[in-house]
Amino acid sequence: MNSALYRRLARATPASVRPITQIRSFTRSTTWLQNTEDTTHFGFKTVPKDMKESLVRNVFSKVASNYDIMNDAMSMGVHRLWKDHFIRSMAPARGAKLIDVAGGTGDIAQRFLEYQDQNGDSTSSVHMVDINPDMLREGEQRFANTKWQSDKRIGFTVGNAENLEFVESESFDVYTIAFGIRNCTHVDRVVREAHRVLKPGGRFMCLEFSRVSNPVLASLYDMHSFYVIPKLGELIANDRASYEYLVESIRKFPAQNEI
């Protein structure tokens, strides 16, 4: 791809880095996060709240083995730039403890550890959490036989972002959730738990898709989302339905000015 076009796509594509340093004030204005009825959305479908978690788990169990390949195919590799920018925006301090929720295949955790190593810090660590054991297994394989594993700087737990009962309060410097919060049933509970496990002054960082404001780019983005991505899922992962859900879940997530 032409390098100028690649940079332009990276700026135009709708992924938002949302570093929030004071979660207490954020949680006071999250009425859009709270569901008061017995149903919620699963893509464009309406489902009982108590079903969504298992439906989402099933989607990610299906896509786990092809997750990284599909990210490259769907974004033409631009997701790598988003995630690099995400870590640079974090600019973690030496010795930082990161909890990476919905950590999946571990690319955020790996970037964090690489960034710290490059800046002369060999003491920072990551605790990866994911509700889906198949996704977390991919992350464990990524870190198998690495220096970070041997130095015990990376750990893994199957767990729910809405209830991090296995994590002590005020125990982490940074909380990240990348392309995961829109799949949660009760987002207000996710944010509340993030606030609980962060140390005073800790950082909540959410990387998530959002809306395209330019009408021309928006129409192109819709075409890519609803026609190209499901087709890629069908061809590469033999799974069209899961990628239809992933596209629909982005559209159901609030726009930037609603967050």
Image: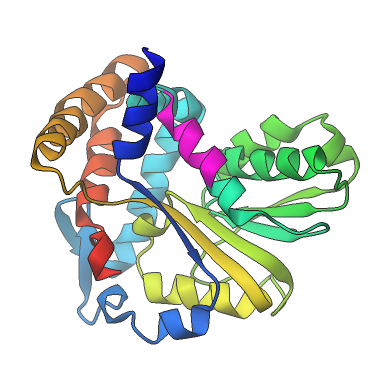
Predominant SS along the magenta part: helix
User: Going by the image, does 193 lie left or right of 200?
Assistant: left
- Between 225 and 24, the one lying in front of the other is 24
Residue beneath the point at 50% across and 84% down: 24
Residue beneath the point at 26% across and 58% down: 253
Count of marks placed on residues: 0
Quadrant in which the C terminus appears:
bottom left
Q: Quadrant of residue 247?
A: top left
For residue 237, say whether it is visible. Answer: no
Image height check: is 164 above or below 128?
A: below
- Between 45 and 220, the one lying in front of the other is 220
Q: Quadrant of residue 231?
A: top left
User: Going by the image, does 211 lie left or right of 62?
Assistant: left
As for residue 179 lying within the magenta part, the answer is no
- Between 3 and 134, the one lying in front of the other is 3
User: Going by the image, does 103 lie left or right of 29?
Assistant: right
Residue beneath the point at 35% across and 57% down: 182
Query: Residue 46 at what x, y percent from top left?
Result: 15, 60
Magenta highlight range: 77-85
Residue extending farthest to the front is 4
Query: Residue 156 at what x, y percent from top left?
Result: 70, 50
Residue beneath the point at 51% across and 78% down: 23
